[in-house]
């Protein structure tokens, strides 16, 4: 009978240690590489860089490009915010984070934008790409073309959402460039990235970047991202006074660690950036429309612009007219010759004589008027039956027009708030005008200085148009008060 010997404790500890080495080493080896980049957003000057040109997985930072192209498409009339987009089976099947869209569902384009920017919803981002280009692959090619036009030389996109895929790579420098273009190219949409929550059509969604927005003074965006291969990524922007800094981090180990590192980089940027510097906005890339083969349903909305049809290409007008006159002359000559027996040469001579410029007839000689003619002219005698009205006779009352209005009733307006500076009031007017173009188009933007701030007003409207504008702005959560003629 064999006796079973007990395994020495030392041997058991060795096996346990070996097991943990097999687990821990691969995990540490697969940790995402770190990269960072800090720039002065006003001038684009680099303030800090580390591994900034290393091609890494961008994760959901990808959605910045998806949204940039969406804003570009709206600006160029490819699609509208109210366009109804049909959700495909492919978009509905995207893994989380997602909005929960269903295959065949129709949803306004504005809600897809909100869900992508705030919640970082993968299904919404895919739906945006399919709506604009018909397929996610075609949209990814457009994303890459746009990246090259923006100067993102080391970026290649393979999808619209940023989930890990072979060849889908970018750099900290390139994503900072994209964030700066997002800020200055489409400022009317930039407020999306600072919303703590928003209505995404089917439900309200919370911002994935709400912790940094709440913790860091001046932070107002832009986009977070995470996958196992990428780590915790973030492109953040903050404004303090006249200074604005953009900081990007790739490969954070956790949300809290990433946010802490970004806060340090932003602090570094504010310390290194000059307090005053000339604003040099990046140049907007040339617009290259896509195929636009997505399945969309256009909502009933007025067209933004009416295109004038091109003129039909014709030959020189003078040449055509001369040709027609010659043909008519020949035809008439032949007809006359055949009916009356007149020689064609006689007709030709007659036409030449008729087309010659007639001699100017001499003007009649001027008649001399005596110098004392005015004194010899007597006025006509007043008729005897013409009697003047007596002074006591009551005349009919006449209406005296004291003021004639040329405004056509356009004496109303709307006030969208009071702001601490004229700059912020003017920026609010421009942003609001672009957001509500249908009702505010043609109105006069005016900033009025008050004792407690600067009022932002739209003037030159009718009462009905002012009332409609206020109701539509209230639906967008924008404060509004009607301003009367007084």
Image: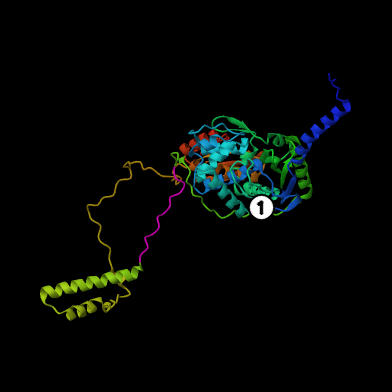
Is residue 265 or residue 405 the one in the foreground?
A: 265
Residue farthest toward the front in the current orientation of the protein: 1
List x then y, in percent, for residue 243.
Answer: 72, 47
Is residue 390 or residue 48 the one in the foreground?
A: 48
Decide whether residue 311 is among the magenta residues: yes
Is residue 429 or residue 111 the one in the foreground?
A: 111
What residue sits right under mark 1 in the picture? 154
List x then y, in percent, for residue 425.
Answer: 62, 43
Judged by its main secondary structure, the magenta piece is loop
- Which element carries disc 1, helix, strand or loop? loop
Q: In which quarter of the view is residue 254 placed? A: top right
Residue beneath the point at 72% across and 45% down: 247
- With respect to residue 378, does 18 lie above or below? above
Residue beneath the point at 75% across and 49% down: 51
- With respect to residue 453, does 345 lie above or below? below
Is residue 450 visible in the rendered image? The answer is: no
Is residue 107 visible in the rendered image? The answer is: yes
List x then y, in percent, for residue 478.
Answer: 57, 36
- With respect to residue 15, does 377 lie above or below? below
Is residue 225 or residue 242 the one in the foreground?
A: 225
- Left/right placement of residue 258 relative to residue 317 reads right
Decide whether residue 410 is among the magenta residues: no
Q: Which region is colored magenta?
A: 302-314
User: In which quadrant is the N terminus drawn?
Assistant: top right
């Amino acid at each position: 009978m064999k006796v079973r010997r007990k395994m020495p404790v030392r041997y058991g500890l060795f096996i346990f240690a070996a097991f943990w080495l097999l687990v821990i080493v691969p995990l540490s080896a697969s940790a995402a590489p770190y990269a960072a980049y800090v720039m002065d957003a006003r001038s684009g000057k680099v303030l800090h860089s580390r591994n900034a040109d290393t091609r890494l997985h961008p994760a959901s930072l990808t959605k910045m490009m998806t949204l940039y192209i969406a804003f570009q498409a709206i600006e160029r009339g490819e699609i509208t915010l109210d366009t109804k987009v049909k959700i495909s089976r492919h978009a509905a099947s995207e893994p989380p984070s997602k909005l929960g869209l269903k295959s065949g569902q129709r949803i306004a384009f504005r809600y897809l934008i909100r869900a992508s920017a705030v919640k970082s919803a993968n299904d919404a981002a895919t739906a945006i790409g399919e709506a604009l280009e018909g397929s996610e692959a075609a949209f990814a090619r457009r994303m890459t073309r746009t990246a090259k036009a923006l100067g993102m030389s080391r970026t290649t996109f393979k999808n619209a959402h940023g989930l890990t895929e072979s060849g889908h790579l970018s750099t900290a420098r390139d994503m900072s460039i994209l964030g700066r273009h997002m800020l200055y190219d489409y400022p009317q949409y930039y407020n999306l990235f600072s919303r703590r929550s928003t209505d995404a059509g089917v439900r309200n969604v919370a911002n994935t970047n709400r912790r940094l927005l709440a913790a860091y003074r001046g932070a107002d965006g832009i986009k977070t991202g995470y996958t196992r291969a990428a780590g915790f990524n973030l492109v953040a922007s903050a404004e303090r006074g006249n200074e604005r800094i953009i900081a990007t981090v790739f490969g954070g180990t956790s949300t809290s660690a990433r946010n802490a590192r970004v806060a340090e980089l932003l602090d570094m940027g504010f310390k290194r950036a000059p307090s005053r510097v000339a604003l040099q906005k990046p140049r907007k890339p040339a617009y290259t429309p896509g195929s636009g083969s997505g399945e969309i349903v256009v909502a009933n909305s007025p067209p933004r612009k009416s295109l004038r049809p091109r003129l039909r290409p014709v030959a020189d007008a003078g040449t055509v007219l001369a040709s027609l006159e010659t043909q008519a002359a020949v035809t008439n000559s032949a007809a006359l010759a055949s009916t009356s027996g007149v020689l064609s040469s006689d007709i030709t001579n007659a036409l030449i004589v008729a087309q010659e410029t007639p001699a100017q007839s001499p003007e009649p000689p001027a008649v001399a008027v005596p110098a004392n003619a005015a004194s010899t002219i007597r006025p006509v005698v007043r008729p005897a039956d013409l009697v003047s009205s007596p002074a006591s006779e009551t005349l009919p009352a006449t209406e005296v027009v004291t003021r004639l209005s040329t405004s056509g009733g356009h004496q109303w307006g709307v006030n969208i708030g009071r702001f601490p500076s004229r700059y912020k009031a003017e920026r609010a007017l421009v942003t609001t005008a672009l957001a509500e173009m249908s009702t505010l188009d043609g109105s006069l933007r005016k900033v009025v200085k008050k004792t407690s701030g600067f009022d932002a007003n739209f003037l030159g409207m009718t009462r009905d148009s002012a009332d409609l504008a206020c109701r539509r702005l209230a639906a967008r959560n924008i404060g509004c008060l009607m301003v009367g003629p007084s």
